[in-house]
């Protein structure tokens, strides 16, 4: 799947690795089951590790694994399923996670800005997706009425001017 | 889309206490319209599927109903100024069939909307600082409050300030736009609950502690629909500064754990019911783990918003004796409420003429009310959750003139709080979800009790009608609740008694087997005759019911059969 970052398609250095496959020396995304199973040996691994966090698992439950991780992939089973927004925000605000947060599954361009504001850094988009549509979707509204994770500068009252890269 | 020709909009009345937009708010609204217009275009170009477009249009208030699109326009916490009401009249005339429908959530719906007109309608709304944002969809909806806010003698804290803060905070909230289901917040600041706060996803009761500081009792998990539940109190006194942070914790807990596989179990009330006391503990844990300082509500912001709702320039007046004319007195007895300011009163305008559609107002009536608001009420109008309008600040000496004007416009039906002041959802006449008609049932009940003396004799009684289990007509909390359902292709009506929405919130009890469309009005009459036969002198229906219970009503309704 193409990967979107800052409104542009970018190369994806990560590979998803099945639970029974050999772990490559390159950045690898694992399931929660495998990460739990192999946590001890993975602690000494040099190449970056990523985790697929299922929507039903609270971030607090994997807090102990976060020091191992450079990437957390969140899943939207359907675009209407907004649990990933809360997970992303918890990762950033409550657990200080600074690695990549990737939104995967069924995501639509109209959600891009909100995902960014919740702390998501990259989005897996459908093959053939036009990055210009996604980039436009994150820029159409430049004012927000509440604090979130993306940089912004305060205006008066609750209002903030969003600073989109 | 073609730009709509600019139309001169009447200036905002200087003393109307609506939140006043500035350049930032207007820029935001223009951006939001551009976003929606782009979404319509992408749908037309096939870039968005209908499944993907549907929640996007809903979040902008656009429903597909039985015969046409319906646009639901937000009236934030039910507060309007005269220029806004005039613009709603203009929209009704230009893009609808000359009327609008005020809802139980203090909004207005236009039932005959064309998709291609919507961006122009949104621009016409934006011209008076209005919009349709989050009037539908699985997000935080329009916050509702007391229609007598800023006027009621029993008000402790002005709820409009916090309703506006919540409106802003919830607008396009990045985390809470794809919730399991819709989320409704009501807030009151008065001793008497006039907002049904225990029947909302979150109900807030603004109050003061012994030190005079403002805080909120927080109730969560109330609601109607298929599984009606009274809310649980989470906090008795949440300090003002913590309002937004704590609500973030409530919403975050719900977003993470609310059911998403069954639409009827997706509201927060199911989560609260199933978790019991654990829900409040979970919210507290979530709140404790949050960077609370980021969410603190700055007192300077509260002070700035409070300025928008400063009292209008009331004159120093004394209360006056009202004229004796019987017709005027009959109207005033039902429609006029005491005001905190001597010499003033609040006036409820009935949108329930005998045989009419509850909550409907014609464009001409809206214009009349706008004019009367300018003349008599500092240019301000409120929408009540019982689908009436309110002029909040009327000089008592002006009441006879106001009454004459309302009468001339067909807006002086003296039935506020009586059996013909019915809440009804649109039902099968408009709504794609309905399983039975509600409007004609309301009309027939109203006609049966057209005689005002009879209504007055029966006394205060709230009749609420829903055309399906979703309970938009609040049947669970009607003193008499009527629920229309489909039974093997036939509309039948279940009746509940004893519901209440206020401080004494209660869910109605089912009286027995349902009645046919033809028989339902007789059944309501039988219930009311039973009340009249059993009541103590001056006893209201609800009090009589609580004293004598269901049995006498059951007996009267079913014994003969």
Image (tube, rainbow, N blue to C red):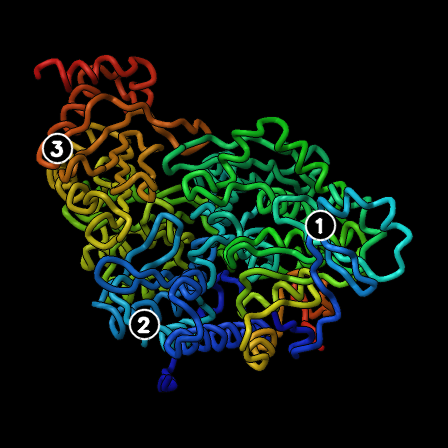
Quarter occupied by residue B46: bottom left
Chain under disc 1: A
Residue that lies at the very extreme toward the right in this rendered image: A44
Are the residues tagged 2 and 3 within 8 Å (C-beta)?
no
Q: Are marks 1 and 3 on the same chain?
A: no
Which one is in front, A147 or B389?
A: A147
Is A93 situated left or right of B335 in this image?
right
**Vertical placement of residue B37 versus B373, above or below:** below
Q: How many marks?
A: 3
Alpha-carbon neighbours of circle 1 within 10 Å: few (<14), some, or many (≥20)?
few
Q: Is residue B516 visible?
A: yes
Q: Give the distance between the C-alpha atoms of the residues marked 1 and 3, in whole angstroms.
A: 64 Å
Q: Secondary structure at mark 1?
A: loop
Residue A14 at x, y percent in the picture? 74, 66
Instruction: Find disc 2 in the rendering and name its residue.
Output: B115
Instruction: Find disc 3 in the rendering and name its residue.
Output: B516
Residue B188 at x, y percent in the picture? 52, 42
Instruction: Find disc 1 in the rendering and name its residue.
Output: A20
Residue B168 at x, y percent in the picture? 58, 60
Chain under disc 3: B
Alpha-carbon neighbours of circle 3 within 10 Å: few (<14), some, or many (≥20)?
some
Q: Secondary structure at mark 2?
A: helix
Residue B379 at x, y percent in the picture? 41, 63
Chain under disc 2: B
């Amino acid at each position: 799947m193409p990967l979107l970052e800052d409104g542009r398609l970018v190369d994806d250095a990560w590979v998803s690795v099945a639970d029974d496959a050999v772990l490559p020396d390159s950045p690898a995304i694992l399931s929660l089951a495998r990460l739990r199973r192999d946590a001890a040996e993975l602690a000494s691994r040099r190449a970056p590790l990523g985790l697929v966090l299922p929507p039903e698992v609270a971030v607090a439950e994997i807090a102990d694994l976060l020091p191992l991780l450079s990437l957390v992939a969140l899943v939207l089973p359907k675009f209407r399923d907004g649990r990933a927004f809360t997970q992303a925000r918890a990762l950033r605000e409550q657990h200080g996670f600074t690695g990549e947060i990737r939104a995967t599954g069924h995501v639509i361009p109209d959600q891009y800005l909100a995902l960014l504001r919740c702390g998501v850094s990259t989005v897996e988009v459908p093959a053939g997706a036009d990055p210009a549509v996604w980039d436009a979707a994150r820029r159409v509204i430049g004012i927000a009425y509440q604090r979130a994770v993306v940089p912004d500068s305060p205006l008066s009252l609750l209002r903030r001017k969003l600073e989109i890269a | 889309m073609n730009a709509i020709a600019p139309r001169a909009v009447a200036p905002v009345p200087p003393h109307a206490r609506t939140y006043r937009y500035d350049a930032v708010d207007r820029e935001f609204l223009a951006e939001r319209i551009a976003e929606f217009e782009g979404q319509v275009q992408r749908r037309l170009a096939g870039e968005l599927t209908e499944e993907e477009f549907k929640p996007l249009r809903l979040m902008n208030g656009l429903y597909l109903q039985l015969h046409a699109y319906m646009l639901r326009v937000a009236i934030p916490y039910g507060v309007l100024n005269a220029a806004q009401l005039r613009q709603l009249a203009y929209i009704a005339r230009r893009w609808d069939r000359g009327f609008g429908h005020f809802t139980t959530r203090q909004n207005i719906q236009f039932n005959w909307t064309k998709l291609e007109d919507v961006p122009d309608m949104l621009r016409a709304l934006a011209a008076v600082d209005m919009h349709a944002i989050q009037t539908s969809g699985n997000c935080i909806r329009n916050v509702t409050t007391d229609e007598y806010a800023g006027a009621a003698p029993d008000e402790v804290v002005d709820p409009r300030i916090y309703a506006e803060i919540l409106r802003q905070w919830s607008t396009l909230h990045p985390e809470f736009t794809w919730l399991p289901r819709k989320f409704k917040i009501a807030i009151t600041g008065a001793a008497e609950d006039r907002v049904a706060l225990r029947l909302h996803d979150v109900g807030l009761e603004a109050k003061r502690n012994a030190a005079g500081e403002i805080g909120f009792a927080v109730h969560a998990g109330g609601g109607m629909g298929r599984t009606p539940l009274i809310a649980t109190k989470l906090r008795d006194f949440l300090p003002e500064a913590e309002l937004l942070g704590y609500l973030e914790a409530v919403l975050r807990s719900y977003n993470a754990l609310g059911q998403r596989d069954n639409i009827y179990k997706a509201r927060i009330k199911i989560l609260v019911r199933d978790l019991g006391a654990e829900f409040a503990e979970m919210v507290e844990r979530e709140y404790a783990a949050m960077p609370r300082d980021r969410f603190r509500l700055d007192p300077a912001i509260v002070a700035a918003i409070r300025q928008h709702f400063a009292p209008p320039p009331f004159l120093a007046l004394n209360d006056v004796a009202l004229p004796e004319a019987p017709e005027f007195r009959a109207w005033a007895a039902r429609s006029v409420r005491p005001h905190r300011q001597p010499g003033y009163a609040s006036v409820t305008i009935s949108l329930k003429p005998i045989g009419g559609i509850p909550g409907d107002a014609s464009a001409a009536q809206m214009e009349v009310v706008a004019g009367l608001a300018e003349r008599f009420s500092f240019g301000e109008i409120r929408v009540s959750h019982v689908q009436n309008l309110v002029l909040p600040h009327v000089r008592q000496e002006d009441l006879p003139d106001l009454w004459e004007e309302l009468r001339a416009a067909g807006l002086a039906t003296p039935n506020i709080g009586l059996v013909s002041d019915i809440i009804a959802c649109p039902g099968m006449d408009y709504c794609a979800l309905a399983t039975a008609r509600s409007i004609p049932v309301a009309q027939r009940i109203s006609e049966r009790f057209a005689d005002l003396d009879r209504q007055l004799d029966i006394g205060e009684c709230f009749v609420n009608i829903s055309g399906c289990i979703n309970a938009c007509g609040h049947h669970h909390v009607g003193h008499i609740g009527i629920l229309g359902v489909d039974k093997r292709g036939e509309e039948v009506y279940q009746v509940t008694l004893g519901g209440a929405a206020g401080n004494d919130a209660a869910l109605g009890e089912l009286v027995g087997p349902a009645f046919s469309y033809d028989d339902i009005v007789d059944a309501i009459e039988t219930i009311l005759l039973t009340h009249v036969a059993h009541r103590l002198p001056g006893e209201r229906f609800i009090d009589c019911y609580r004293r004598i219970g269901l049995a006498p009503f059951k007996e009267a309704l079913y014994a003969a059969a």
